[in-house]
């Protein structure tokens, strides 16, 4: 492994204090929803102009248009993965990941820790992936390798946080973990903070370290884009589980229309497309200084999103952690 290649998979630990603006809950939530829907609206225009038809989905899933698959990959040339974990792509890897998630989730639930919400729903998506039939992806072994490495990045960040090694925790994760530990945000905030940190911060470094091109010279972007189908299939289940298991107040944000789910899912798909492009930027960097600049921009973007999310979903006004904590206590008493 060359030093330049390995550095693409690492990100510097930023030591900036993250503090969101003091905004009223109702106003900030509306601003955030309008912004997200604005991004999704741009996506809808692109899709409409392209004339692409929606892929088949379950009746209760949001309508699905995998628009990132329309965009070409730019990275060229195969380079082997810099990660050793699950390099052989065994299906046993996902079973081990799920077991580790269960262990951590049991600890969070016993303490009624608000970090449980993101992890529980991350586990649901992972189980959805595990249940896919062989051949769903062009390279199933690569996806198994990716799944294991991706989860380990989350485990490592959480372990560093819990052991007090805060300088080793990326800023977007520091904001997410602190907001959960200090019960500062609603369940919607915990979920979005976790998704933001894991996707917009962790994923570009992971993809760059795994390699964007297969040994035969083909791009791995089609499989990256196809995972959007897994997320789309999980969307309603994630919201339902979060509402029933963690925070009943999430029902406030669950607008029962197909269009609403469609727009919100497209915003996540937009994040994942940006993730791929950031990974390409890391791979294209030719000097350590260039890679550091790209890494800093990735860290700063994820942290900025985290501050917006934290400010948009505070416990304020009618929203308190009381119902959420009561639900956890009731579950633990059974």
Image (cartoon, helix red, strand yellow):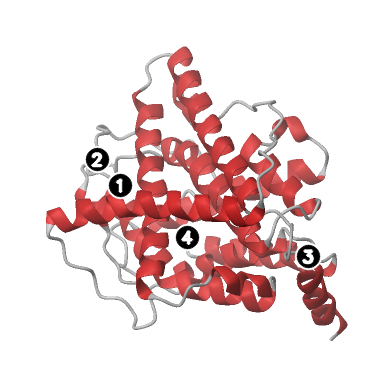
Mark 2 residue element: loop
Look at mark 4 in the image and give the residue it sits on. 90
Nearest to the eye among marks 1 and 3: give it: 3
Residue plotted at (61% across, 70% down): 250
Q: Which residue is mark 2?
A: 73
Quarter location, residue 139: bottom left
- Whichever of callouts 2 and 3 sits on the residue coming sooner in the sequence is 2
Mark 1, residue position: 220
Is 76 situated above or below 182? above
Q: CA distance from mark 1 to mark 2?
A: 8 Å
Q: Which residue is mark 3?
A: 321
Q: CA distance from mark 4 to mark 1?
A: 18 Å
Q: Which of pointers 4 and 1 lies earlier in the amino acid sequence?
A: 4
Q: Residue furthest right?
A: 333
Is disc 4 in contact with disc 2, using a CB cutoff of under 8 Å? no
| Residue 86 is at least partly visible in this image | no
- Crowding at dot 1, Cα within 10 Å, few <14 / some 14-19 / many 20+, comes out as some
Q: Mark 3 or mark 4, which has the lower sequence index? A: 4
| Dot 4 or dot 2, earlier in sequence | 2
Find out whether the residues at labels 1 and 2 contact each other: C-beta distance under 8 Å: yes
* 307 or 130, nearer to the observer: 307
Left/right of residue 293 with respect to residue 61 in the rendered view: right
Compute the Cα span from label 4 to label 2: 27 Å
């Amino acid at each position: 492994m060359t030093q330049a290649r390995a550095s693409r998979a690492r990100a510097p630990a930023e030591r900036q204090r993250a503090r969101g603006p003091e905004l009223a809950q109702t106003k900030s939530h509306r601003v955030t929803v309008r912004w997200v829907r604005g991004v999704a609206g741009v996506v809808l225009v692109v899709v409409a102009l392209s004339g692409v038809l929606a892929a088949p989905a379950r009746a209760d899933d949001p309508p699905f248009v995998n628009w990132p698959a329309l965009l070409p990959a730019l990275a060229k040339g195969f380079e082997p993965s810099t990660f050793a974990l699950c390099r052989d792509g065994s299906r046993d890897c996902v079973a081990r990941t799920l077991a580790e998630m269960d262990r951590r989730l049991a600890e969070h639930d016993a303490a009624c820790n608000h970090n449980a919400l993101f992890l529980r729903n991350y586990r649901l998506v992972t189980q959805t992936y595990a249940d896919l039939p062989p051949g769903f992806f062009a390279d199933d072994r690569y996806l198994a390798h990716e799944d294991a490495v991706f989860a380990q990045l989350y485990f490592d960040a959480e372990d560093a946080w819990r052991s007090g090694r805060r300088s080793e925790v990326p800023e977007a994760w520091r904001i997410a973990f602190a907001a959960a530990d200090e019960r500062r945000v609603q369940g919607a905030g915990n979920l979005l903070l976790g998704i933001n940190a894991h996707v917009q911060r962790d994923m570009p470094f992971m993809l760059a370290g795994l390699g964007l091109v297969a040994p035969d010279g083909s791009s791995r972007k089609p499989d990256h884009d196809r995972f959007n189908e897994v997320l789309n299939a999980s969307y309603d289940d994630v919201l339902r589980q979060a509402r029933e298991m963690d925070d009943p107040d999430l029902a406030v944000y669950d607008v029962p229309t197909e269009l609403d789910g469609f727009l919100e899912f497209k915003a996540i798909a937009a994040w994942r497309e940006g993730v791929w492009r950031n990974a390409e930027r890391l791979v294209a960097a030719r000097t350590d200084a260039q890679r550091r600049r790209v890494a800093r921009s990735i860290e700063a973007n994820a942290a900025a999103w985290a501050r917006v999310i934290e400010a948009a979903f505070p416990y304020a006004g009618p929203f308190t952690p009381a119902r959420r904590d009561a639900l956890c206590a009731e579950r633990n008493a059974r």
